[in-house]
Structures are given as C-alpha cells and as structure tokens.
Image (cartoon, grey):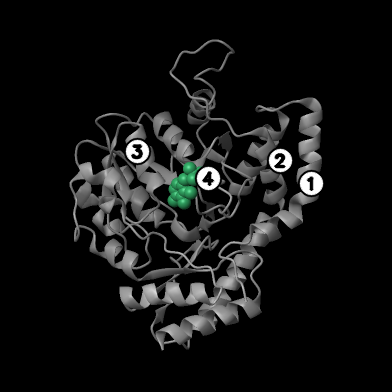
Amino acid sequence: MNIAFVDLKAQDAEVRREVEEGWRSILDRTAFVLGDEVRAFEEAFADFSGVAHCIGVANGTDALELALRSVDVGPGDEVIVPANTFIASALAVSRVGARPVLVDCADDHLIDVDQIEARLTERTKAIMPVHLYGQMAPMRGILEIAERHGLVVVEDAAQSQGASQDGTGSGGLGKVAGTSFYPGKNLGAYGDAGAVLTNDPDVAQRVQALRNYGSEIKYHHPVTGFNSRLDTLQAVVLSAKLRRLADWNDRRRSSAARYTELLAGVDGVETPTTVAGNEHVWHLYVVRLADQETRDRAITELGAAGVGVGIHYPVPIHLQGAFEHLGHGHGDFPATERAAETMLSLPMHPHLTTEQQEYVVARLAAVVR
Ligand SMILES: *Cc1c(COP(=O)(O)O)cnc(C)c1O
C-alpha cells in the first residue's frame, strides 16, 4: 500500500475543469495581475472566514510581514511568538526589524498562555498566536493579556482556514492576521499565495497599498511598499477549492475522529487534544510517542511500509541557526524540545479512506508494541 501524507492529485481532480476554464479566460484576456478573479476570491474568502476584509498577497510569509507592518511593528519592537511553530512566523517578525521573543508550548502544542506575561518587556508591541495544526490558540487568555498591556494581536492563521473558536473564525479575533495558501495547506494554490485578514478598514487599506508598491493611486507612492500580490491564476484555483473547503474540512474532521478511535486501544501513542470551544480543521494529525528512539523508528518503519509521515517541527525556532542571535540554547523551552523529539504527523487530507487509516494505525501499533 502507498499512502500519501497529502494527496494533492485527488484535490486537483475535483477542481480541474473549473481551473482550466478560469485560466483559459485569463489567457484570452491577458489579464494577469489583480483584476476580477483576485477581487472575487478576496470577497469569498473574507466571507468564508467571517472577517470583513481579505487582501491577497504573494505568500504566507509576506502576509505576516505586511500584517505586522500595517500595525506599525518595526525596529526596536518585540513580538511574542511560540517556540513551537514553522520558521516563517518568526521570520516575518525579523523581516520587519523586530525581535521575536519566544514562549514555550503547552501539552496541546499551542503557545502556553500562562508563560506569556513573564516574557513581556516595555518593548513588547505585539503577540503572534499561531493556530497550529488546524486549531486556534487559546485566544481569550491572549486577548486579555494584550488588552491589559496595550499590545496588538497579529494571528498566524496559515494552518487554520475554516477553524473557529467560540463561533469566531480564525483571523477574526486579533487586529490583523496572515494566512498561507501554500499547496499543502487546507486551502492550497498551485504555487505560492497568501492573504491578510482584518476587520479594521484602515489596516486593510494600508495592506492594499503595501502589497502594491505602497501605492493607492497609480504612480503615487506615499509609503515604501512591496510587490506582493496574489497571482490572478492562483486566485482561480483558490476560488474553485474554496467552494469545497467546508466539505474537505468536514472530511478531515471525520478522519481525525477515526484515527483517535482506532488509536484508543494502542498503548504508547498519545492522540491530539482539542482546546475547549475550538472547531478544529485538522491541517495535521500529530501524535506523541514515548521517546525519540521510538519516534525515529516509526518514521523509518512507516516509510518502508509506504506510509508518508512527517515531523512538525523537528527543530524548534530557538535552536535554528537563523535565530542564534536570540542567545538561546538546549533546555530553554523544554516542552517544545520534548515535542520535537517525540511527535509524529500521520497522513491527513480530505481524501483519506478508512482502509488507509486502518493500515496506518496497524503499522504504527506494530512499531510501538
Ligand atoms: C506555511 C506557514 C507559513 C508561511 O507561509 P508561506 O506561504 O509558506 O510563506 C507561516 N506560518 C505557518 C504556521 C505556516 O504553516
């Protein structure tokens, strides 16, 4: 058996006709930059997310960078970022000239809210919660801390398209959010793409200008901008997939429930938990094994059995060369380090079958036995 970690071919098969028609129309009109397709997708994705404004940009890292710039985070500022996240969360902070200040994760792998306040200084300007693996970080506690200390909340919503907390969609609780449409995300393009989400019309207007050379009126550039637009061809792909995203997220939820049920009888495999009030969209299904030796053996043996698995993420932010200047070392964020040693992401996508899941669990059970 061969079980892909992510099955992009099955997604493509569902949307291929719409994509080809949309692309042909763009080619016929040679309308390659911005235009109706981008606007239509932005409106549809804002609607889907329950957020007032969506601005399409070139990728998720740019989305986070422009989100930070739109609320004036810059040199001399500090931004709270989880130590357990993809590198791009912290890179966006570096790129605006600010300093990422890391916080360890809790048992659920999300930022540990109880450790945030100890890391605040008079330079702290923002908190960047990351809605990791498809569920939102505990926003109530984060928003309370932000309110108490006058901080702005910039959400990293790259892994949480369609997720919500107590009824509010991902990207709608902070001041501004960045998301990514990298091909493997829950909503993925056929290349790089991303978006900024916000309920604040002024922030939206700033991001509109920032992504387009700092210009609102052609050839007038009151601020230093960038070229970071959502590609028009990608907007067609994203609109076609967005129409199926609620269904695809439902299917991911069913698959996650099935994994948890199948793994209930397997000693030595800790299944993921969901924060109270969260509607999870299962970008990743991440289990924990007893120790690093078992986890590494699982990767080898599942790989040999044709099962695609991964680690998200094997090297925490504070142990990356790119962030050596933060001055951290081994032992500084023990929960994140322990997670990096013992976690394992199982195949997760909307087209996973029961039979495939049973096979994955049987192979994993054989490893931990
Ligand atoms: C994918 C991802 C990003 C970056 O998105 P790109 O489109 O690859 O630049 C940022 N943060 C998280 C948590 C991600 O998973």
Residue at disc 3, secondary structure: helix
Give the amino acid at mark 2.
Val
Give the amino acid at mark 3.
Val
Residue at disc 1, secondary structure: helix
Q: Earlier in the sequence, mark 2 or mark 1?
A: 1
Residue 202 picture location, percent across and down: 49, 27
Q: CA distance from mark 2 to mark 3?
A: 30 Å
Q: CA distance from mark 4 to mark 3?
A: 16 Å
> Contact, CB < 8 Å: mark 2 with mark 1?
yes
Q: Is residue 66 left or right of residue 319?
A: right
Q: Earlier in the sequence, mark 2 or mark 3?
A: 3
Residue 194 picture location, percent across and down: 55, 40
Residue 341 quadrant = bottom left
Q: Say whether mark 2 is within 8 Å of ligand 1.
A: no
Q: Say whether mark 1 is within 8 Å of ligand 1.
A: no
Q: Earlier in the sequence, mark 4 or mark 3?
A: 3
Residue 351 picture location, percent across and down: 66, 66
Q: Residue furthest top?
A: 219
The disc placed on residue 180 is 4
The disc placed on residue 81 is none
Q: Earlier in the sequence, mark 1 or mark 4?
A: 1
Q: Identify the residue at image location x=72%, y=30%.
A: 36
Q: Is residue 315 left or right of residue 333?
A: right
Q: Earlier in the sequence, mark 2 or mark 4?
A: 4
| Residue underneath mark 2 | 236
Q: CA distance from mark 2 to mark 4?
A: 16 Å
Q: Identify the residue at image location x=63%, y=61%.
A: 7
The one of 358 and 128 positioned closer to us in this rendering: 358
